[in-house]
Image: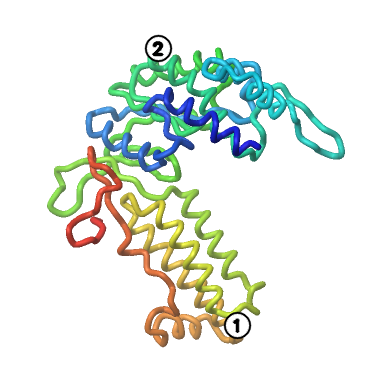
Amino acid sequence: MQTAVKLVIEPVFEADFLPCSFGFRPKRSQHDALQVLIDQSWKGRRWVLESDIANCFEAIPHSGLMSAIEERVADRNLLKLLRVTLRAGVMADGAVHRDVTGTPQGGVASPVLCNVYLHRLDRQWAERGTGVLVRFADDLVVMCHTKREAEVALSALRSILAEMGLEFKAAKTRIVHLTEGGEGLDFLGFHHRRVRGERGYRHLRFLARWPSREAMQRARDRIREITDYKRLRDPVEVIVQDLNRFLSGWANYFRYGNSRLHFTRITTYALRRLARFVAKRHKRRAGYGMTVVAFVSPNRMGLVNLDRLVVTPSPFRDWRAKPNAAGKGRR
């Protein structure tokens, strides 16, 4: 039912959504949002306000959400269905709890409903804000030219959210200056930092990005789960297939960045974990497993190599464009 609702209302509101919104929208992705950071940094906007909205999906008031929907939807049956969906509640400990805030937990329509309500934020920002807003659902950054401009942006956003019954997550709200040797920021799984060009481009400074510490740790945790000793009864081929499936999916997202060194680290970690698994399976020492996987096997037992997947993003260039004539990613 929620899927049917989503199919009906999404095209209606998609026609109104502003360019600053990227999350859960057709033909828009995280990499489109990330490209804006590179472009605006190149234009000189290197003071960044980063934050996200506290408990956004749970805090959206039903009255405000229905009011936003009624601005574009007049069908009474559909509006009644949406009200029933919002009031359905959640079963916990044998009792139904009904709140006056929040979108359906885990519902396929929740991202669209969230965007419908936060569209009010985007509209207010277009009138009252300063700087360039980049919002992916409840995660957002504002690119500014000066610290003062970023402070004004913070004040404006805090005021707009308060009017909507929402607030910032204090622990994740800060203003960052993207400068060489300074701190960076994490956004959409990447760590962003201004660096100096390598080799023949030492005069060039640009905004680089690579997998954040949290993203790297989650990848290691997943690799450790796949190669856990509890799976010693599984054939090594199955373990390698599971590793390749995860590594390929992980790299498909993080390949669009300055990620070569981090890809090498993750690949090396996966290789070592596979070697330890092989050694344990044969009740031998770890060195035996590394010998089998890295030297005896001609292709590391089929373990995928991520090094050649990296594509370095460039300012004002569509990230979907082909890397170069040779078909290889620029590092």
Residue at numbered disc 2 = 128
Q: Amino acid at mark 2?
A: Arg
Q: Amino acid at mark 1?
A: Arg
Q: Quadrant of the N terminus?
A: top right
**Left or right position of 80 against 280:** right
Front residue of this view, candidates 257 and 170:
257
Front residue of this view, candidates 187 and 182:
187
Q: Position of residue 237 (x, y in %)?
A: 53, 78
Callout 1: few (<14), some (14-19), or many (20+) C-alpha neighbours within 10 Å?
A: some
Front residue of this view, candidates 305 and 293:
305
The answer to whether residue 327 is above or below residue 87 is below
Q: Position of residue 293 (x, y in %)?
A: 45, 81
Q: Name which residue lies at 41% across and 50% down.
A: 211
Q: Name which residue lies at 50% across and 13% down.
A: 159
Determine the secondary structure under disc 1.
helix
Q: Position of residue 142 (x, y in %)?
A: 38, 26
Callout 2: few (<14), some (14-19), or many (20+) C-alpha neighbours within 10 Å?
A: few
**Left or right position of 162 against 106:** left
**Left or right position of 297 against 231:** left
Dot in front, 1 or 2: 2
Q: Name which residue lies at 71% across and 21% down.
A: 100
Residue at numbered disc 1 = 281
**What residue occupies the far right of the structure in this picture?**
94
Cα separation, mark 1 vs mark 2, equals 63 Å
Q: Quadrant of the C terminus?
A: bottom left
Q: Counting residues from the N terminus, which is met first, the one under dot 1 or under dot 2?
A: 2
